[in-house]
Image (cartoon, rainbow, N blue to C red):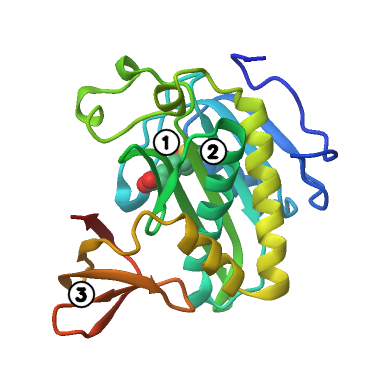
């Protein structure tokens, strides 16, 4: 059944539900950004897995200071508190982990063949369907907590997008031809996130990297990259152990890109 509002609190049991996180799911109506709400909770000691979902964000944000279009009742606008003990250099891995979890949940619940564009976009039919923003808070040189922000364009119609996004963004409803049950999908995302996070804490980044590579729409493609230090072009050949994208240039050299933007050509 389709529900227009995020109306049910999550019971951590059964298939598609999380099992270990004793999650408090905060469901809010309108917020500026769920990132801010989750941060506030994390600062006051909220446990790992605490999640905030909102019907609408008035100041939803993306990477690189961009805005995230978050109209009411149409998407999954959610932020989750994570508290891994990680060196700072490893935090980009959390973005890739979240991408694997969300992509798996979308495929399982909707059948839409979403794929991951490095580092944090999920695409369907070549257009963006989901963005992931992991923000870290540091303490004594290490990670204090991270907030994994997940924006899934679930039930937006073409006319719900501003003109400038129509060519580059899509939604699950547009791709599958039917509305998505946002509660079911949000449950699945949290269950996959917990499952992949447990694997990551137990076994390290290698299994996440393998899953990421199999869901990727980036590998094997020619890429233009831009980082604050560097610009260039190459073929995407894999991820390194930190989650950097490895590109091979025309001279056969391997370039590692840890942050920034890429364009698939
Ligand atoms: C991106 O693609 O640049 C990342 C977009 C992340 C959007 C989500 S929606 C929930 C959370 N709250 C925000 O303000 N941003 C993230």
For the residue carrying disc 1, how many other residues have a C-alpha within 10 Å: few (<14), some (14-19), or many (20+)?
A: many
Instruction: Give the CA separation, mark 2 to mark 1.
Output: 8 Å
Q: Position of residue 12 (x, y in %)?
A: 82, 40
Mark 3 → mark 1, Cα distance in angstroms: 28 Å
Lower position in the chain sequence, tag 2 or tag 1: 2
| Quarter of the image where the N terminus is located | top right
Q: Are marks 2 and 1 in contact (CB under 8 Å)?
A: yes
The mark that comes first in sequence, 3 or 1, is: 1
| Residue 20 percent coordinates (x, y) | 82, 53
State the SS at label 2.
helix
The 10 Å Cα crowd at callout 2, few under 14, some 14 to 19, many 20 or more, is: many
Q: Position of residue 50 (x, y in %)?
A: 70, 46
Q: Name the residue under label 2.
A: 34
Q: Residue at x 18, y 74 (%)?
A: 230
Q: For the image shown, how many numbered marks are present on the structure?
A: 3
Would you say the residues marked 2 and 3 are in contact, meaning their CB atoms lie under 8 Å apart?
no
Q: Name the residue under label 1.
A: 60
Q: Vertically, is 263 above or below 24?
A: below
- Residue at image position (26%, 61%) is 221
Asked whether mark 2 lies closer than 8 Å to ligand 1, one says yes
**Element under label 3?**
loop
Q: Horizontally, is 232 left or right of 1 in the view?
A: left
Q: Does the residue labelled 1 lie within 8 Å of ligand 1?
A: yes
Residue 237, above or below 222: below
Residue 256: which quarter of the image?
bottom left
Residue in the image at 57% along x and 47% along y: 104
Between tags 2 and 3, which lies in front? Answer: 3
Query: Is residue 91 placed above or below 81 in the rendered structure?
Result: below
Tag 3 residue:
229
215 horizontally vs 7: left or right: left
Snapshot quadrant of residue 161: top left
């Amino acid at each position: 059944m389709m529900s227009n509002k995020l109306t049910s609190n999550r019971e951590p049991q059964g298939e598609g539900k999380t099992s270990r996180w004793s999650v408090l799911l905060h469901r809010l109506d309108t917020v500026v950004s769920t990132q801010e709400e989750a941060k506030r909770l994390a600062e006051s000691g909220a446990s790992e897995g605490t999640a905030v979902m909102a019907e609408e964000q008035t100041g939803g944000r993306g990477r690189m200071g961009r805005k995230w279009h978050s109209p009411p009742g149409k998407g999954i606008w959610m932020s989750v508190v994570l508290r891994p003990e990680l060196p700072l250099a490893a935090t980009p891995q959390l973005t890739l982990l979240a991408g694997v979890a969300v992509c798996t949940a979308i495929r399982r619940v909707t059948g839409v063949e979403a794929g991951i564009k490095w580092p944090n976009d999920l695409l369907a039919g070549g257009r963006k369907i989901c963005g992931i923003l992991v923000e870290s808070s540091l303490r004594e040189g290490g990670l204090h907590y991270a907030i994994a922000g997940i924006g899934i364009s679930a039930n937006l119609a073409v006319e719900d997008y501003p003109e400038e996004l129509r060519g580059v963004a899509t939604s699950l409803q547009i791709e599958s031809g039917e509305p998505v049950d946002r509660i079911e999908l949000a449950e699945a995302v949290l269950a996959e996130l917990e499952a992949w996070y447990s694997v990551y804490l137990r076994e390290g980044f290698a299994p996440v990297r393998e899953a990421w590579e199999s869901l990727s729409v980036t590998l094997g493609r020619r890429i233009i990259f831009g980082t604050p230090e560097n610009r260039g072009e190459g073929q995407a050949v894999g991820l390194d152990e930190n989650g950097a994208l490895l590109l091979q240039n025309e001279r056969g050299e391997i370039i590692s890109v840890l942050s920034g933007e890429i364009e698939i050509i």
